[in-house]
Amino acid sequence: MTAPVLARPANPDLLPLLGRTPLARIRTPLPHPQPGFWAKLECLGAGGMKARSAVEMLNGARARGELRPGGTVVESTSGTLGVGLAFAGQALGHPVILIGDAELEPSMRQLLHSYGAELDIVERPAVKGGWQGARLARLHEVLARMPYAYWPDQYNNPDNAAGYHAMAQELIGELDDLDVLVCSVGTGGHSAGLVEPLRRRWPGLRVIGVDSVGSAIFGQPARSRLMRGLGSSIHPRNVAYEAFDEVHWVGPAEAVDACRRLAKGCFVSGGWSTGAVALVAAWAARTEAGAAVATVFPDGPHRYLGSIYDDAYCRAHGLTPENAATRPVEIPHPGAAEVMGWARCRTVLDPLEVRL
């Protein structure tokens, strides 16, 4: 039985800390020399990147009457949205229950507890849907016991994407030109939220989605993944498939290599998503001569000190530079072959519509 969650006072003074993150020029070879791309450093924003969407989702639910004053928020997370919801819960005055899984790092568990969130951890992945499926099943059990709690449903809530409109306006104010946008894709929120306003400003903007090897989002078969934060074993409805010109799948060896090169070369780095988008953004800047390329670094390196930045962990999992592809393999269709490392495809389809 889930224990009652105590109401908490709101702290609206936190809200002005949201967003307005710096934009860095990245010229580090990844792994080849490249002319440089722009990276929005969301790790330097209060609550991280997903605090933007968390505040928007809770404010939207409050406006519609779906979330009562002081009501409890329950959500599934692999970590990053959990931090964002902890921020939003403190700012708006809502207790937060987070459904995590056994792969959630001890440091992240400690951080979420410190921020006042309650954690409910599932110990085994579901046969269908993996860890996400197991977390969602537990979430529905909790909601059945707490009928007045609110579930933001980050995977399908359009307010998730709306939370990134302010980031798009920041980019418009910071950049003179933008030809290529590179976005990691998990729930689909930040890519969907950025593309529409950015394409209004730059109609010819090309958008590259970056997924994880082993993710089902763009039509590859779902399987166990080391990488967290991007990719999914389910098909989130927030993914704006029609917005993408191409998709790249990046493996953990490539992401680790990029993260470590960033850390040594420009003092700016992060986790799996950051390594993956940096690799693809550098590739785009290198292959599209003269193009202005931008991406978003969703988080910083601290959560990954025991994985990406740990030599023993990387050796144990084969995440060494010699195992990292230096160029993508191209496939003609998402179903043409199961990719095992960095690959690209210029045919982007919604897997659920393909099945119909």
Image (spheres, rainbow, N blue to C red):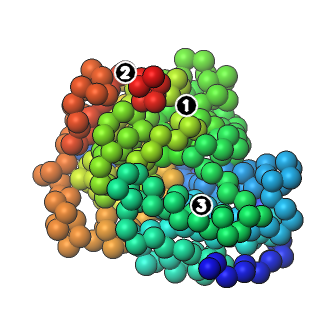
Work out how far the residue at label 1 is from the one at label 2, CA to CA, in angstroms.
14 Å
The amino acid on which the numbered mark 1 sits, given as a three-letter code, is Ala
Left or right of 246, for residue 338: left
Quadrant holding the C terminus: top left
Label 2 environment density (alpha carbons within 10 Å; few <14, some 14–19, many ≥20) = some
The amino acid on which the numbered mark 3 sits, given as a three-letter code, is His
Q: Based on the displayed image, in which of its 4 quarters is residue 159 positioned? A: top right
Q: Residue at x 40, y 51 (%)?
A: 129
Q: Based on the displayed image, in which of its 4 quarters is residue 345 positioned? A: top left
Q: Which residue is mark 2?
A: 347
The amino acid on which the numbered mark 2 sits, given as a three-letter code, is Thr
Query: Which tag, 3 or 1, sits closer to the chain's start?
Result: 3
Q: Does the rendering let one see residue 274?
A: no
x, y percent for residue 303? 44, 69
Q: Is residue 296 above or below residue 301?
A: above
Instruction: Give yes or no for contact between labels 1 and 2 (Cβ–Cβ under 8 Å).
Output: no
Q: Which residue is mark 3?
A: 140
Q: Which residue is mark 1?
A: 240
Which of 263/215 is in front? 215
